[in-house]
Amino acid sequence: MASQTMKLSLIFIPLLLCFLAASVQSGGIAIYWGQDGREGTLKSTCDSGNYVIVILAFITPFGNGQTPVLNLAGHCNPSAGGCKSLTPDINACQAKGIKVLLSLGGGSGSYTLTSLSDAQNVAKYLWDNYLGGTSTDRPLGSAVLDGIDLDIELGGTSYYDVLAKTLSSYSSKGKKVYISAAPQCPYPDAHLGQALSTRIFDYVWVQFYNNPPCQYQSGDITKLTNSWNTWTSNVKATKIFMGLPASTGAAGSGYIPPSTLTGQVLPMAKKSSKYGGIMLWSRYFDVQNKYSDQVKSFVANLADDGDANGTSTTATA
């Protein structure tokens, strides 16, 4: 009997360890694509194997009675139906298990929500034209996107909670609608604070750049650490990502050299159970700097960031 029990233990323990390892969700990289025609195709972005989420940027203008307009600068012209050619690329990304989201807003353009009904109308338009709805003139063709991202940096601060709730409610129609947000790192975010309090966001990628009070300073991760801890402690999102510029040219400040990210920042960030990975702005700058190539394995690895002997591995900036 004892021998039989030992044999079962020898079988069960490795299986249990494998289960526990598999049940821990590792980190991944989310990337914004669409604002530079030199960044390559959407398909090549997904074929790189570096990303788990691709965010199409942007929808602007929208709100205040305006019909939401897709703006994929340098890639296609939606007014002439040119963006429908992206359907095969979107389908190819999704076939690889990569989620494809559509971002509203950005750092320029004309957008705001003026009332509860305005927010609901925007949500309905997005559902009908980009998600599971049945509009006959979908800007991206027959592709059904996985969700909507809110990168709200301009305009009013009201009704984004209504927009998020309405979009999330469409999940009841079948396919889940993922909701994400890209707030600035000063907490709470001026435009998205109310929306984030709804607790319905799947992903929040906080922009830890162009905000010196809460970002990495050369050689010092103190402000970044304090801000990360504030966000992960207070925001009830499924996963929180550290939003970063993919090169020095991608933002005015806040760039973190790959060696610093892998050696100091990620070990700190991974202490939170809400750690989801990093978000990079943007695919164009990532192609130029090969940032994701240098950090991908460290972002995904939930163990200590080092080699088999426990020593730190240095990536080049």
Image (tube, grey):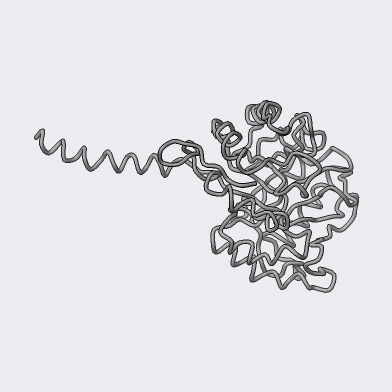
Residue 103 drawn above or below residue 3: below
Q: Residue at x 75, y 46 (%)?
A: 248
Q: Which is nearer the eye, 44 or 23?
A: 44
**Residue 243's quadrant in the figure?**
top right
Q: Which residue is drawn at 37% across and 42% down?
A: 19
Residue 312 drawn above or below residue 34: above
Instruction: Measuring from the top left, give residue 99's x and y in whole percent.
Output: 61, 55
Count up the numbered dots: 0
Instruction: Measuring from the top left, give residue 253's x and y in whole percent.
Output: 78, 40
Q: Which is nearer the eye, 215 or 13?
A: 215
Compared across the picture, whether 60 is left or right of 273 comes to right
Q: Which is nearer the eye, 212 or 75?
A: 212
Residue 39 drawn above or below residue 186: below
**Residue 7's quadrant in the figure?**
top left
- Quadrant that contains the N terminus: top left
Instruction: Measuring from the top left, give residue 308's x and y in whole percent.
Output: 41, 41
Instruction: Measuring from the top left, give residue 51's x and y in whole percent.
Output: 60, 54
Compared across the picture, whether 199 is left or right of 310 comes to right
Compared across the picture, whether 212 is left or right of 49 comes to right
